[in-house]
Amino acid sequence: MVKGSERRKFKRLPKSASLKVQVLAYKEQDAQDVTLYKDLGGGGMLFESKVPYQKGILLKIQAMVPGWGGYIRNFKRTEDNEKHALVTVAEVVRVEAMEEKGFEVGVHFVNIYENDHRALIEYIESMTDEMD
């Protein structure tokens, strides 16, 4: 998993797909940020946003992960699993202003369904092995 000076516990897959982000708060939050993620790993993801999220806040993330349907263990068909969004609670760990408008936001998953997490890790491992 971790190579040499690499600090990440999980491999990252450079991939882009749709993402919905909502701040978790005691007060109901209607606004959702709809954007794209730039890379995805078993422990977190990087996405672009027009919103300068604060480090440490929690977000509810719903991400589409094209290609991971075959790795989800349930009784549904792979085609049906492909429509299943990865849903997680994530903590903002990094926010950087981009030269263009917006921000790059790095998040760490703090709560994720066990079956989805396992499927995500297996999917990323298989995809990164193909890239090597």
Image (cartoon, rainbow, N blue to C red):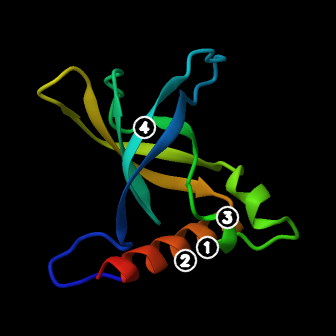
Q: Which disc is residue 36 wearing?
A: 4
Relative image position of residue 58 (x, y in whole percent): 50, 37
Q: Residue at x 60, y 66 (%)?
A: 117
- Residue at the right extreme? 75
Estimate the spatial distance between the alpha carbons at disc 4 and disc 2, rounded to whole Å.
Answer: 22 Å
Graded by Cα atoms within 10 Å as few (under 14), some (14 to 19) or many (20 or more), the crowding at tag 4 reads: some
> Which amino acid type is shown beneath numbered disc 1?
Arg
Q: Residue at x 61, y 18 (%)?
A: 29
Q: Sequence order check: which comes first, mark 4 or mark 3?
A: 4
Q: What residue sits right under mark 1 in the picture?
A: 118
> Which amino acid type is shown beneath numbered disc 2?
Glu
Graded by Cα atoms within 10 Å as few (under 14), some (14 to 19) or many (20 or more), the crowding at tag 3 reads: many
- Residue at the left extreme? 99
Q: Which disc is residue 75 wearing?
A: none
Question: Which picture quadrant has residue 32?
Answer: top right
Question: Which picture quadrant has residue 26?
Answer: top right
Disc 1 is placed on an element classified as helix
Q: Sequence order check: which comes first, mark 4 or mark 2?
A: 4
